[in-house]
Amino acid sequence: MAVLDHEGWRKAQAQHMSPQTLSLFAFLAGIFVIAAVMTDWNWFFEHPKAKFFVDAFGRNGARFFYGVLGCALVILGLYCQQFRF
């Protein structure tokens, strides 16, 4: 196991995303998903990766699922920003 000196540690840290960036990304992704749910964007729900949930739960069920997912992402982003994770 290699021991990192100060410069090696800084390089290793620079390769990872900061917690503030991750929390902002989660918050913005949640807002985006909530906007897709509220406006019922066809291009969002007809995407092959979303089509699985549309086929499994129906269009309204998929909208509900993605609404919960969007709210969870917004809460996660706010929580991580508040407590500096």
Image (cartoon, rainbow, N blue to C red):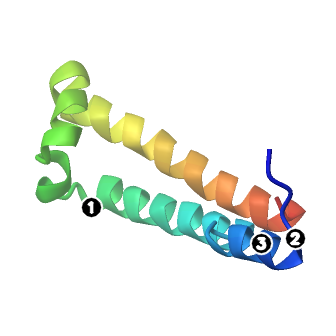
Q: Amino acid at mark 1?
A: Thr
Rendering quarter of residue 40? bottom left
Q: Amino acid at mark 2?
A: Asp
User: First in sequence: mark 1 or mark 2?
Assistant: 2
User: First in sequence: mark 3 or mark 1?
Assistant: 3
Give the label, 3 or 1, closer to the camera. 3
- Answer left or right for 75 relative to 27: right
- Residue at the spot x=82%, y=58% of the render? 85
Identify the disc placed on residue 5. Answer: 2
Neighbours of disc 3 within 10 Å: few (<14), some (14-19), many (20+): few
Neighbours of disc 1 within 10 Å: few (<14), some (14-19), many (20+): few
- Residue at the spot x=19%, y=35% of the render? 59
Count of numbered badges drawn on the protein? 3
Mark 3 and mark 1: Cα distance apart in space: 48 Å
State the image coordinates of residue 76 (x, y, percent, origin top left).
67, 52
State the image coordinates of residue 28 (x, y, percent, origin top left).
51, 69
- Answer left or right for 82 relative to 39: right
10 is higher (above) or lower (below) than 62? below
61 is higher (above) or lower (below) than 23? above
- Residue at the spot x=25%, y=22% of the render? 57
Q: Which SS class for mark 2?
A: loop
- Answer left or right for 76 relative to 26: right
Rendering quarter of residue 77? bottom right
Identify the disc placed on residue 39. Answer: 1
Contact (CB < 8 A) between labels 3 and 2?
yes
Neighbours of disc 2 within 10 Å: few (<14), some (14-19), many (20+): few
**Among all residues in the image, which is located at the extreme top?**
56
Instruction: Name the residue tied to disc 3.
Output: 8
Mark 3 and mark 2: Cα distance apart in space: 5 Å
State the image coordinates of residue 48 (x, y, percent, origin top left).
13, 41
